[in-house]
Amino acid sequence: MIRRAYHVEASQRGLSLIELLIAMGLGAFMLLGIISLVASVSTTRTELANTSDQIENGRYALQVFNEDVALGGFFGKYHPGIGAVTYTSPSPCETTAANLGFDSTLTPVQMPLAVNAFPYDSASSAPGLTIPSCFSAEVRDKSEILIVRHVDPNSVAVTAANIPTGNTTPYLQISGCDLDSLSFRISTDRADLTLRENGCTGALSTLAEAWPYTVNAYFISPCNDCSGAGDGIASLKSYEFRAGSGGIRTLVEGVEDIHFDYGLDLDGDGGPDCYVVNPTVDTKPAACPVGVTYEWEATDNLNWQNVVSIQIKMLVRGSRSSSNVSNTKTYNIGREILGPYSDNVKRQVYSTVVMLPNVAGVRE
C-alpha cells in the first residue's frame, strides 16, 4: 500500500509588529494629510469670507453715496437758476420748518445748499467751526463731514391721508400757477400747503404736489456701538433728518477714514473746472484755472453753490485679522498717506466720483 503524505500549513492568526508599525505610519500620514487639507480649506474659507465682507462693505458705502449725493439739490420741480436764489447753510440739527433755509418771500428767494461740509481737520483745528451738537458725540476726531440736502424723489398729493393732522415731516410744495403769490412753501401743516398746479382753479384736485424734505450728514465714528467706552469698530455713520426728527444710523462698519474733494464749476458750464479739498479757503487753490468767468468767490456759500461733483475716497478694513497677511502697505486717500498698520488686517481704498445733476444740469 502506498501512503501519501499531506502537508497542512497553519493559518495566519495576526500581524507582526513590523506590519503594525507600517500600517500605523501610513494611517497617521493619511490622517495628517486630511487634517492639513481641512485646516487649509477652513483658513481659505475664512479669508475669502473676510475679503468678501470687506469688498461688500466698500461697494455698499459707494452705493450709498452714489444714490444720495446725486440727489443733492433736488427740490422737486423748482430750479431757480444761477443768480435767482440766495443759498444758505443751516445746521443739519434744525428740525423746525421755518429754520431749514427756505424763504420764497425774499428777492431773490432763499434755499439751502445742495451740499456743504466740515472739511478735513475742521473738527479739531479750524477756528470758528463747531461740529453740530446732534451728532458731535459720535464723530471721530478730524473726521470730515459731508452734508447733503434734498427732497424725497417720491412726491405726495396734499391730502389728509398723506399729510395727517399732527404731521411732523416738512413738505416742500412748488407752485405751478402764475397767480400764486409764492413760488414755493415748506411746512409741516397741511393747511399751509395751498399752492396750485397749472390751471389755477383753486380746487383741491389742483393743489400742487409736495415732497418730504431730508438732510443727511455723513461722518466717520470711532465706534459702531458708542455706548460706554464704545466697541472700537470704526464705522461710516450718518445723521439723518427725516419725518421731522433726526437720528444717527450706522451705515457700514470698518470704514476707517474718508476724504472728499469738491469739483467746482467756475465758468458756469456745468462741468467741474477743478477739485479742491476745502471750498471755504480765502484764496483760490492752485489747482483751479485763472481767468474763468466767475473766478473764486469771497463768500463760503457762493463757493459751495458751485460744487457740481464730489470725489469720495474711503479706507475700508476687514472685520478680522488674517494670519497670512502682514500689513506693511500705505494707503493714499488724497489728503494724506495712511499706514503702515501694525496688525494683520486687510485694507483697501475705494473711490468714486458723483455728479450733482440737479446743480450742474441748470448750468449747461
Image: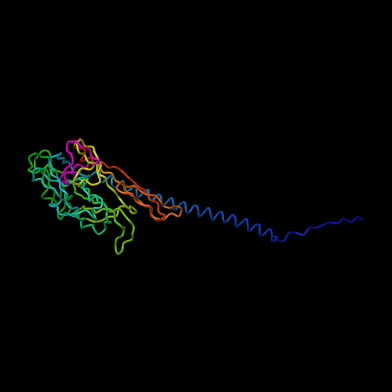
Task: Indicate the quadrant containing the N terminus: top left, top right, bottom left or bottom right.
Answer: bottom right
In the displayed structure, 196 sits above or below 226; it is above
- 278 left or right of 184? right
The magenta-colored residue range is 286-307
Percent x, y of residue 165: 14, 54
Task: Indicate the quadrant containing the C terminus: top left, top right, bottom left or bottom right.
Answer: top left
Q: Is residue 94 magenta?
A: no
**Residue furthest toward the bottom?**
228
Percent x, y of residue 163: 16, 51
Looking at the image, which residue is at 22% across and 49% down? 117
Pick the residue in front: 174 or 162.
174
Looking at the image, which residue is at 50% across and 53% down? 40
Percent x, y of residue 168: 17, 54
Percent x, y of residue 159: 15, 48
Looking at the image, which residue is at 15% across and 39% down? 82
Taken as a whole, is the magenta stretch helix, strand or loop?
loop
In the displayed structure, 83 sits above or below 6; it is above
- 16 left or right of 188? right
Structure colour scheme = rainbow
Pick the residue in front: 215 or 275.
275
Pick the residue in front: 281 or 112.
281
Marks counted in the figure total 0
- 325 left or right of 199? right
Q: Is residue 295 magenta?
A: yes
